[in-house]
């Protein structure tokens, strides 16, 4: 049994971890422990210091040291005399936000719960158990259902929260966080992933200071600027040692992560929908479901934690035909042509690509409506026959005839003012009546909180997928959302719109991916502006960044790798000088970096010179040979690219027989020793053949491998290791 309850103590056990909580004498659910297995009830760690100005619940009478301001709580509500950041805030009786949540009941079920209307981790019946705990506020009759999904083999616990209005008047939810985790002891650091367009998920590790630190997004998207994932690490925790906890929110809209270090040096982590752009009216009898958080912890460092997240996201979040199967090697025309193409140009690129072994031609932005630049046409999903003469069907047939599959770009959520869709349905855009809307990339956003709009998009995109032989969709979204107002919602429901938008998007993706199971959907949001576990439920890969520069990509992909599996990372070789940075990296380096993901090209292959075509053909062959190992292997970060002169990583096959080590040396230097790279994840005693020589795992992990001499900056390297003693 992964879940057990004894004397009011709830134990959630996985292979290597224990999560514990307990109902105390006042009916308050205390958090006791999240960490390594202890085989012990951890309530002996609870302390009741008499802290001045930390008050007590009325029922505690004169027990002045019992305070919800100092106790570790499982789910903290606003207004119960605990002044730390709350997980729940709700205006209830008489406009007050006071709540006092007390334990009411619990249930244990086989299998894993799902959340209505939202993506969530799915499992087989025997792979997980569910614990449901109901807390209640007796005055407002608000019920809080805490759900825990325990995946013992994967060392994963999921959490979700449903709030029900059990009273007889409307309540207003101001904040319903999905996670509340109190950690009374230790010295902590947190790692978050900040960035910007073309430089997403830059890992930053900071001490947890007194007061509240936060990351989040109020942009209607999980965003380029912050990612809905966070690590808490004990001081000294490294890639392969020390304790850390990770949390990833399965949500693609605005979010908030807050970490508070309180007056007693205790740490509280809360995470959920961004309260700044959220409010929800709950009528009597209605329920609200918050998105899911995926949790894991490791006492073997951050590398192990990442591998657990990779596994659960790949195996229990991503779905469909392409979840495990080989992904096609793509050629995308965006950086090759931008908007300046016709069917001949596309066919020429495709022909060259086919000759080099590439599987699929993806036609990017500009194939529809009046779309010769980014100022018009979005919303008119009708092929532009002055560019694609003869139409899409004819082009696809021609490409298929070359042995190439065909994929197509859409940006369904956006609209240009210069489009028939906008002229016919101005009421479908997000804008505040009486105010001019904010333009971004000169475009507006469609109101996906309106079911009519969702239906229109379903019919339009679905119609094209039904009509043509399209085997891949790039689902793009190129702006952040503001001006929240929907023509379809009454005034007192307007602030529900940001969350309703996300629900509309998920329902649309659910219908389309369900109806077209053979189509590979790749998520995109100006690159990686919506790279989160929510989108990965619909799209098993996401275009990682609009920055295709090999050097910058090592930093972006390093940050991405903390939570997201390598198969999820869309990654292409592009032309040099790079279009975003002007850097010139060798084709070898560009190929090496792009191979650490779902691989493709994004340049005009006809412009390759000399030996380059043969090199591309070789790369495609190499990637196809390694794809199973790259996507299905265990991933190790071998360096921190923010600290040294090198980015390096490794994939080790599940049976440990093969490993692929790749990387980039950033700056070349003369008259120095060759670089040395220590490997990880090997068996110490085993012997490995690397390029004709044999080494022990111990030697490779302590002495390391000598890298080739550097010649030029950003030099790529690859080693293949084969374990030889068990053949
Ligand atoms: C942003 C994407 O990230 C790019 O790859 C490309 O598809 C452009 N949009 C097209 O407008």
Image: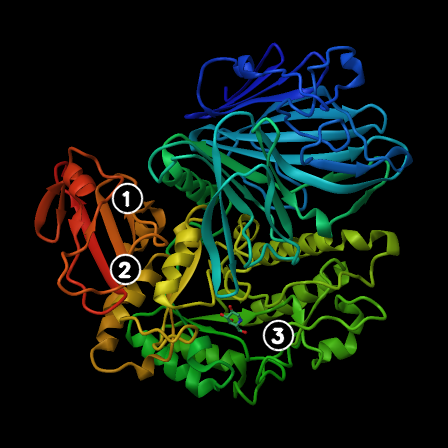
Which residue carries the number 1 mark? 653
- Is residue 541 visible in the rendered structure shown here? no
Is mark 2 in CB contact (under 8 Å) with mark 1? no
Left or right of 717 on screen, residue 116:
right
- Badge 1 local density, few (<14 within 10 Å), some, or many (20+)? some
What residue is at 57 percent from the left and 56 percent from the top? 513
Q: Where is residue 675 in the image (x, y as percent from the top left)?
A: 19, 55
Q: Position of residue 304 (x, y in %)?
A: 37, 37
Which residue carries the number 2 mark? 664
Query: In terms of image quadrants, where is residue 572?
Result: bottom left
Q: Which element is circle 2 on?
A: strand
Q: Which element is circle 3 on?
A: loop
Residue 207 or 692: which is nearer the viewer? Answer: 207
Is mark 3 in CB contact (under 8 Å) with mark 2? no
Q: Where is residue 646 in the image (x, y as percent from the top left)?
A: 28, 56
Query: In terms of image quadrants, where is residue 703?
Result: top left
Looking at the image, the residue that sits furthest to the front is 52
What residue is at 34 percent from the left and 52 percent from the top? 643
What residue is at 73 percent from the left and 11 percent from the top? 63
- Badge 3 local density, few (<14 within 10 Å), some, or many (20+)? few
Residue 390 or 268: which is nearer the viewer? Answer: 268
Which residue carries the number 3 mark? 441
State the separation of the CA atoms marked 2 and 1: 22 Å
State the separation of the CA atoms marked 3 and 1: 43 Å
Is mark 3 in CB contact (under 8 Å) with mark 1? no
- Badge 2 local density, few (<14 within 10 Å), some, or many (20+)? many
Left or right of 177 on screen, residue 208:
left
Left or right of 20 on screen, residue 682:
left
Quick one: label 3 or label 1, which is nearer the N terminus? 3
The image shows residue 39, relative to residue 361, as above or below, that is: above
């Amino acid at each position: 049994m992964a879940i057990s309850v004894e004397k009011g103590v709830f134990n959630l056990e996985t292979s290597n971890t224990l999560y514990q909580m307990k109902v105390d004498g006042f009916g308050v659910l205390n958090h006791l422990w999240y960490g390594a297995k202890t085989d012990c009830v951890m309530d002996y760690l609870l302390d009741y210091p008499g802290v001045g100005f930390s008050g007590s619940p009325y029922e505690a009478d004169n027990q002045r040291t019992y305070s919800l301001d100092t106790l570790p709580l499982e789910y903290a509500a606003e207004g119960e005399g605990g002044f730390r950041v709350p997980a729940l805030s709700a205006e209830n009786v008489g406009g007050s936000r006071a709540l006092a949540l007390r334990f009411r009941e619990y249930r244990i079920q086989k299998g894993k719960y799902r959340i209505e209307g939202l993506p969530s981790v799915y499992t087989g019946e025997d792979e997980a158990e569910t614990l449901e705990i109901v807390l209640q506020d007796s005055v407002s009759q608000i019920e809080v259902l805490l759900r825990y999904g325990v995946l013992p083999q994967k060392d994963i616990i999921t959490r979700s929260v449903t709030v029900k209005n059990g009273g007889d008047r409307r309540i207003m939810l101001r904040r319903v966080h999905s996670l509340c985790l109190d950690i009374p002891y230790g010295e902590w650091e947190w790692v978050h992933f900040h960035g910007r367009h073309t430089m997403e998920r830059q890992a930053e590790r900071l001490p947890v200071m007194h007061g509240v630190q936060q990351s989040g997004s109020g942009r209607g998207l999980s965003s380029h600027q912050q990612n809905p994932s966070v690590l808490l690490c004990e001081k000294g925790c490294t890639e392969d040692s020390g304790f850390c906890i990770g949390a990833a929110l399965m949500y693609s809209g605005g979010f908030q992560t807050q970490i508070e270090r309180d007056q007693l040096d205790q740490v509280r982590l809360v995470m959920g929908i961004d309260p700044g752009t959220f409010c929800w009216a709950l009528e009597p009898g209605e329920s609200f479901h918050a998105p899911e958080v995926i949790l894991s912890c490791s006492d073997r460092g951050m590398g192990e934690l990442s591998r657990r997240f990779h596994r659960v996201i790949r195996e229990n979040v991503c779905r469909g035909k392409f979840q495990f199967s080989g992904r096609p090697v793509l050629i995308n025309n965006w950086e090759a042509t931008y908007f300046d193409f016709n069917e001949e140009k596309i066919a020429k690129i495709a022909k060259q690509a086919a000759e080099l072994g590439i599987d699929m031609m993806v036609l990017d932005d500009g194939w529809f409506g009046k779309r010769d630049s980014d100022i018009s046409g979005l919303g008119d999903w009708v092929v532009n026959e002055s560019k694609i003469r003869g139409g899409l069907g004819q082009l696809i047939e021609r490409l298929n005839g070359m042995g190439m599959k065909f994929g197509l770009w859409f940006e369904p959520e956006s609209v240009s003012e210069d489009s028939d869709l906008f002229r016919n349905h101005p009421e479908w855009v997000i804008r505040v009546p009486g105010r001019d809307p904010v333009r971004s990339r000169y475009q507006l956003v469609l109101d996906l909180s309106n079911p009519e709009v969702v239906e229109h998009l379903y019919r339009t995109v679905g119609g094209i997928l039904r009509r043509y032989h399209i085997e891949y969709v790039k689902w793009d979204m190129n702006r952040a959302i503001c001006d929240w107002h929907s023509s379809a919602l009454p005034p007192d429901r307007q602030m529900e719109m940001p969350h309703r938008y996300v629900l509309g998007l998920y329902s649309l993706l659910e219908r389309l991916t369900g109806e077209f199971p053979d189509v590979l959907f790749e998520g995109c949001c100006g690159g990686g502006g919506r790279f989160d576990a929510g989108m990965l439920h619909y799209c098993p890969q996401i275009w990682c960044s609009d920055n295709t520069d090999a050097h910058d990509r090592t930093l972006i992909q390093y940050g991405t790798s903390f939570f997201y599996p390598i198969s999820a990372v869309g990654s292409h070789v592009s032309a040099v000088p790079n279009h975003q940075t002007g850097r010139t990296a060798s084709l070898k380096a560009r190929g090496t970096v792009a191979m650490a993901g779902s691989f493709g090209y994004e340049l005009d292959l006809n412009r390759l010179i000399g030996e380059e075509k043969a090199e591309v053909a070789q790369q495609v062959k190499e990637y196809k040979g390694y794809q199973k190992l790259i996507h299905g292997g265990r991933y190790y970060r071998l360096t921190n690219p923010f600290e040294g002169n090198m980015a390096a990583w490794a994939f080790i096959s599940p049976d440990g027989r093969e490993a692929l080590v790749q990387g980039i040396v950033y700056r070349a230097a003369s008259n120095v020793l060759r670089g040395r790279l220590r490997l990880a994840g090997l068996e110490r005693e085993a012997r490995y053949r690397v390029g004709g020589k044999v080494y022990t795992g111990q030697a490779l992990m302590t002495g390391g491998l000598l890298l080739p001499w550097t010649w030029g900056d950003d030099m790529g390297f690859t080693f293949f290791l084969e374990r030889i003693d068990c053949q």
